[in-house]
Image: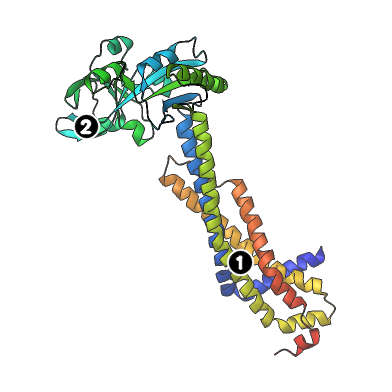
């Protein structure tokens, strides 16, 4: 134990004798560790942000949209299939079924114009997507059945077309059709969720260019559904698949002409992709650690040359090769660990700054990142310090004492 403490003391003294050189050597390790922690923390923060955004909609959300058949023909979904899915006998584990029709048109109010997402939806919209109306109300089934020209808008539409003032009771023109705004949605936290105008599906089909298939059924862009709970998602997917294969007359052995995806699978996929990207960024940042490690090796080789007589003297008074190796390894590890500690502090400061500037990004320095940085720093010191240490240990004591 005494020898270990003595080696640490000698290593600290050696570093203090060449403060500028030691500081410049540690700089590479500091930058590398700071970069690794910062990028990993940023990746984890982005992953948490994306997952939270999607999770706010609910993990039991299901989306169904058409896919090309075996002849590469795309058959859009229709209200006939929506009715089949809405039948509790066909899909017992589905609570809500909401078809959606997307419309591309500009919206105008008193000379101001924008092109938001115009969606024809049903009154179940708020239940399926967990959205709330913060001003006014949502349209009801009576207005849906009567093809009323009413609309609910997102906050970006309010800001762009009404300068932030309450639009409830005022009119807005979509294409050539005038609608009365009856409600404003809560802020979704995403541009796509706030730049939206919702109108009754029947109104969109009748007045905003709804198309029919050869049987006369209105088409829809896709269908959003909500399973009874998160445990019912798999069974709901099976029921939806069976119902749609029957409704779309898909023959046995043929591939589905539709795709059913769950919100949970989307979240898992996104988390995996972001996780791989974070690892990639960490590896790229780790290259700077490699450069810093080469700097440590270079300085330690110079140190061995400068202290050749000291090494010879220590060997002459009985120091073993092991003692020389440990001494120089301690010095290399001291450089790496101090540099790593400074890197952790710098990364923590930068993460705090980013967190204060970007309030919506939940970015923090994880304990696992600090532990990883410490392990990497120590490993760099050992890996790049072992060659200079062995070279010092192999010096002939007689030749070392004669070294000028």
- Upstream in sequence: badge 1 or badge 2: 2
Q: Is residue 179 above or below residue 10?
A: above
The number of callouts visible is 2
Name the residue beneath numbered marker 1: 293
Q: Nearer the viewer, residue 151 or 260?
A: 260
Can you tell which quarter of the image residue 319 is in?
bottom right
Give coordinates of residue 393: x percent, y percent.
Answer: 77, 76
* Residue at image location 71% in from the left, 67% down from the top: 330
Can you tell which quarter of the image residue 344 is in?
bottom right
Give coordinates of residue 55: x percent, y percent.
Answer: 48, 30
* Residue at image location 53% in from the left, 58% down from the top: 285
Query: In this view of the protein, can residue 170 be seen by the observer?
Result: no
Name the residue beneath numbered marker 2: 106
Left or right: 116 with respect to 344?
left
Give coordinates of residue 289: x percent, y percent.
Answer: 57, 62
The crowding category of the residue bearing disc 2, from other C-alpha atoms within 10 Å (few below 14, some 14 to 19, many at least 20), is: some
In the picture, the disc for residue 366 is: none
Left or right: 233 with respect to 216?
right
Query: In this view of the protein, can residue 353 be seen by the observer?
Result: yes
Q: Is residue 190 above or below residue 77?
A: below
Give coordinates of residue 355: x percent, y percent.
Answer: 46, 45
């Amino acid at each position: 134990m005494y020898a270990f403490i003595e080696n640490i003391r000698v290593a600290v003294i050696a570093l203090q004798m060449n403060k500028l050189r030691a500081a410049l050597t540690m700089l590479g390790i500091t930058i590398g560790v700071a970069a690794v922690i910062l990028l990993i923390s940023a990746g984890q923060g982005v992953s948490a942000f994306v997952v939270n955004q999607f999770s706010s909609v609910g993990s039991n959300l299901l989306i169904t949209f058409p896919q090309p058949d075996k002849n590469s023909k795309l058959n859009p979904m229709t209200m006939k299939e929506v009715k089949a899915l809405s039948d509790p006998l066909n899909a017992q584990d589905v609570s809500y079924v909401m078809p959606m029709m997307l419309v591309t048109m500009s919206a105008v109010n008193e000379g101001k114009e924008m092109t938001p997402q115009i969606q024809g939806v049903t009154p179940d919209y708020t239940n399926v997507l967990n959205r709330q109306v913060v001003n006014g109300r949502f349209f009801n089934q009576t207005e849906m059945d009567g093809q009323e020209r009413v609309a609910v808008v997102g906050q970006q539409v309010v800001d762009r077309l009404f300068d932030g003032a309450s639009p409830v009771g005022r009119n807005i023109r979509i294409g050539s059709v005038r609608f009365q705004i009856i409600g404003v949605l809560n802020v979704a936290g995403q541009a796509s969720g706030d730049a939206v105008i919702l109108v009754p599906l029947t109104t969109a089909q009748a007045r905003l260019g709804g198309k029919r298939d050869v049987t006369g059924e209105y088409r829809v862009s896709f269908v959003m559904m909500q399973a009874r709970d998160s445990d019912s998602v798999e069974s709901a997917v099976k029921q939806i698949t069976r119902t749609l294969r029957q409704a779309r007359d898909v023959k046995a052995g043929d591939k589905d002409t539709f795709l059913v995806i769950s919100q949970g699978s989307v979240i898992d996929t996104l988390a995996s992709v972001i996780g791989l990207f974070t690892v990639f960024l960490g590896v790229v940042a780790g290259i700077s650690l490699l450069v810093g490690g080469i700097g440590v090796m270079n300085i330690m080789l110079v140190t061995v040359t400068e202290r050749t007589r000291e090494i010879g003297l220590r060997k002459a008074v009985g120091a073993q090769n092991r003692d020389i190796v440990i001494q120089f390894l301690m010095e290399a590890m001291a450089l790496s660990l101090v540099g790593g500690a400074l890197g952790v502090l710098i990364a923590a400061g930068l993460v705090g700054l980013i967190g204060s500037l970007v309030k919506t990004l939940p970015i923090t320095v994880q304990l696992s990142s600090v532990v990883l940085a410490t392990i990497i720093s120590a490993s760099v010191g050992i890996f790049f310090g072992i060659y200079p240490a062995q070279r010092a240990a192999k010096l002939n004591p007689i030749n070392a004492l004669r070294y000028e």
